[in-house]
Amino acid sequence: MEILNLLEEFEVMGEEGEKWYTRFIPGFIGKTVLDAEEFFGMLHHLRSSLPEEMTTATQVSRDRQRIIEEAREERAKILEAAREQAQLLVSSDEVVKQAEQRAEEIQDQARIDAQAIRAEAETWARGIVERLENYVNRISATISKTRKALITESTSRRSEPFPVEEE
C-alpha cells in the first residue's frame, strides 16, 4: 500500500538523517537534521495518496452544514409563501381557515423534510467517519508493528558481539 511505503520511507529518513550533538545550544542534543525539500516532497506525496474517504469525509462535513442551511432557507421561503397566500385569502372565514390549515401543513412538511435531510446527512457522515476511523486504526496498528520490528531489529544488532556491516 502506497501510504505504508511512504511512512516507512519517513522512518528511514529519520533514522538515516544526520545526527547533531552539541554542548553549546541547550535542548539541541541528539537532534536529527533532515533535508527539508525531500521531507516536504514526501509529505505532499503522502497527502496525495490518502484514501478518497478522507476527502469525502471532509466534504461531507462541509456539505452537512450547507444542507441544513438550505433546508432552513427552504422552510423560510415556504413559510413566507404560506403567509402571502394567507394574506391574499383573508376575504372569508372559510378561506382563512383553509389557508391557515394549509400553512400549518406546509410548515409541518417543511419540518419533516428538514429533519429527514438532516438525519440522512448525519447518518451518511457517521458512516464515512466510522470507515475513516477504521482505516486510520489499521494504519496506526501497522505503524506500531513496524516500529516494534525496527526496535527489535535494532536491539538485536546492538547485542551482537561484533557488528556486522551490511553492503
Image (cartoon, rainbow, N blue to C red):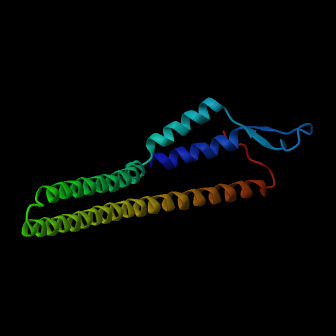
Q: Position of residue 124 (x, y in %)?
A: 33, 61
At which x and y percent is residue 61? Answer: 40, 53
Residue at 65 percent across and 54 percent down: it is: 150
Can you name the residue that lies furthest to the top here? Answer: 37
Identify which residue is drawn at 48% across, 47% down: 3
* Number of on-image labels: 0
In this picture, residue 30 sits left or right of residue 83: right
Quadrant in the rendering for residue 90: bottom left
* Residue that appears at 67% across and 43% down: 14
Of residue 97 and residue 19, the one placed in the foreground of this image is 97
Q: Is residue 47 left or right of residue 167?
A: left
Which x, y percent locates residue 75?
26, 57
Displayed quadrant of residue 129: bottom left
Depicted 135 relative to depicted 34: above or below? below
Residue 144 % position (x, y): 60, 60
Q: Residue lying farthest right? A: 23
Report whether 152 appears left or right of 85.
right
> In the rendered view, would you say 8 is above or below 122?
above
Q: Quadrant of residue 79?
A: bottom left
Along the viewing direction, whichever of 137 and 17 lies nearer the viewer:
137
Which part of the image, by quadrant, shows the C terminus? top right
Q: Observer-nearest residue: 91 or 99? A: 91
Of residue 86 and residue 92, the one placed in the foreground of this image is: 92
Residue found 32% across the figure and 60% down from its top:
121
**Vertical order, 23 against 142 (above or below):** above
In the picture, measured across the screen, residue 137 lies left or right of residue 158, that is left
